[in-house]
Image (cartoon, rainbow, N blue to C red):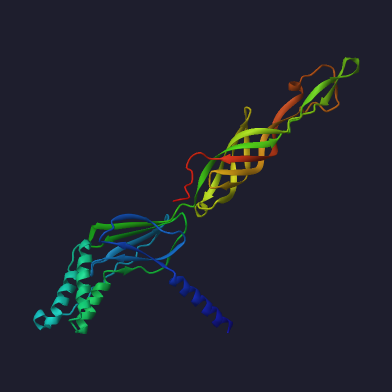
Amino acid sequence: MKAATMMMIVAATLLARVAVCQELSLDLASEKDVRVQVAPLTTATLVIQHAIPGKSYKITIEKGITPIQPLPEPTAAVPTPSVPKAAVPNECVSLIDATEGLRSATDETAIPAALTKLQASLKEGKCQDQSYIAAAQLTIDKTTIKLPGIFDIPIGQSLKLTVQRSDDTTKSWQKVFFTAIRGNWIALSTLAFAPHRDKEYFAAPADNGKFNITTSKNRKFADVIPAVLFTWLPTKQEEDYMVPSVAGGLGFDSSNPVVFFGGSLTFNQNLGVTAGLVLQKQNRLAGKYSVGQTVGENLTSQQLEESSYHPNVFLGFTYRFSQTKNLGK
């Protein structure tokens, strides 16, 4: 019972997948080398239109950089009634002529007109002989080649369809179905604020002409650091008012480079806030000294301190002046 239920679920899934397939076509009569954008995550079937009945074609499908082996060349010829024209009923002459006109075409550009003529002749319904009607319909069917299989084109990928006439290698067509890129990197000018964490020291006078190394009170609250941060904007979020993303970049505190990494929240791609960690140079007491140590000379802060990179936190405000978003589009 469970096995039967599972089979029904699988069958229903496959039917649903086929039902939503999008048909992607290559028209041999009007498309030579074409690129066309399709929706991402497309589940599609491939169809070649306006092929010459009775001609064979070499078909190649490439997805991204992984080529798929060419399909075998069709070899079946289109059957036609072998009844002499003299024995053809008068009401079927025009249908036979239209069928022969489509079959005898030598160039794909002539197929649409010949196909329209044959379809019109069938629609008239003058000929009631089923053998001629079947031959005409089969000839029409041969102008369309439906490729087996279902093809997915995820976002940021492409599917290239190449067709070449087997009897004339100069006759070739190519059509590329591609989706939008996954996203874009955006550069944001940033004004970042990081807590001021420099440690400052001085030599305070002591007894007997000595000096004690003492911590200085630093009343500076924050460092202001200009920076350029880069954030990722996924294509699927381009129309969103608020876009959260990872952000990272580089700034300069005085003459020292500062590295930023954190998260950002961008409003309409142009304004936003960002916060995270920053790696910046901060002053610390030189390793050979300690707070409260007595020294024999009045050392300057430059002699007492050394600069090295330490982590810190930051809050920044971002803005962008170019490539502004137009929501009216």
Q: Residue at x 55, y 51 (%)?
A: 241
User: Dividing the picture into quarters, in which one does residue 178 lie?
Assistant: bottom left
Q: Is residue 130 left or right of residue 253?
A: left
Residue pushed farthest right?
207
Q: How far from the left and from the top, in percent, is residue 145?
A: 31, 68
Q: Residue at x 47, y 42 (%)?
A: 323
Q: How far from the left and from the top, in percent, is residue 315?
A: 66, 40
Q: Is residue 28 left or right of residue 222?
A: left
Q: Residue at x 28, y 56 (%)?
A: 32
Can residue 76 be seen from the camera position used here?
A: no
Q: How many marks?
A: 0
Classify the position of the N terminus by image quarter: bottom right
Q: Is residue 107 above or below residue 199?
A: below
Can residue 207 be seen from the camera position used here?
A: yes
Residue pushed farthest left?
86
Q: Residue at x 25, y 61 (%)?
A: 29
Residue pushed farthest front?
328
Q: How far from the left and from the top, in percent, is residue 102?
A: 19, 70
Residue pushed farthest top?
209
User: Dividing the picture into quarters, in which one does residue 110 lie?
Assistant: bottom left
Q: Is residue 147 above or below residue 90?
A: above
Q: Is residue 295 above or below residue 285?
A: above
User: Dividing the picture into quarters, in which one does residue 60 lie?
Assistant: bottom left
Q: How far from the left and from the top, in percent, is residue 125?
A: 20, 80
Q: Is residue 77 above or below residue 126?
A: above
Q: Is residue 195 left or right of residue 17?
A: right
